[in-house]
Amino acid sequence: MLQNWFEKGMTFEQYVEKMEVNKEELLTIYNQTALTEEEHAFFVGLTNKPTKVIVLAADWCGDALLCIPVMKRIMEATATDMRLLIRDENLELMDQYLTNGTARAIPIFIFMDNEGTELAVWGPRSAYVQDLVISLRSALPPKDTPDFEAKVKEVHHTMKDKFLHDKTMTDSVIKSVQEKFMS
């Protein structure tokens, strides 16, 4: 039952306190993120407004770095309680929310009502971010080349920099979540 998973989860503040990777960056994104009046009105006005959300995440994950603070701002606007679970400590739940039926991609946001009934699932990233990731990865050399690992690190650095300094990244998450609730 989702309610039991929710009760097991950490608050945003507890999650941040336990972070060993990306803590400063996550807080930077959180502090830089604000909903427009229109976005705020949209989320507050939802007829199927969630009251709780479970997040499957890990502090090492770049997508979690971007999405968790943005989602926290959305949840604050709607007085929705958000609890976080570490993916690798909660595989029984994670395996119910695999991306494309095979990948334990995170973060995954499971929106629920007061009774613990699932209303929607979102994650691990917006289509805009997905397109950017595909584009950057397409330029990687073959895995067996000597500089492959260095190039992968460059891609991760580029993504992290965009998450921290390019507002279109946070805007794409907000828009994607809005679209999820419009469908």
Image: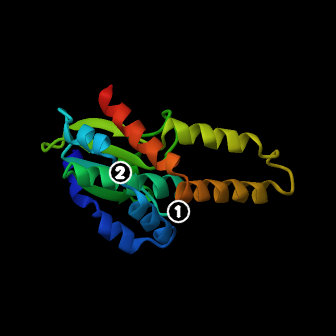
Q: Amino acid at mark 2?
A: Met
Q: Amino acid at mark 1?
A: Trp
Mark 1, secondary structure of its residue: loop
31 vs 89, nearest the viewer: 31
Instruction: Tell whether 136 sits left or right of 120.
Output: right
Image quadrant where residue 183 sits: top left
Which residue is depicted at the point 77% across and 46% down? 140
- Separation of marks 1 and 2 at Cα, in angstroms: 17 Å
Residue 67's spot in the image, x, y percent? Answer: 43, 51
Image quadrant where residue 17 sits: bottom left
Residue hosting label 2: 71
Which residue is depicted at the point 35% across and 47% down? 93
Residue 118's spot in the image, x, y percent? Answer: 24, 37
- Disc on the earlier residue, 1 or 2: 1
From this viewpoint, which residue is outermost toward the front? Answer: 37
Q: Is residue 5 visible?
A: no
Residue hosting label 1: 60
Q: Nearer the viewer, mark 1 or mark 2?
A: 2
Report if the CB atoms under discs 1 and 2 are less than 8 Å apart: no
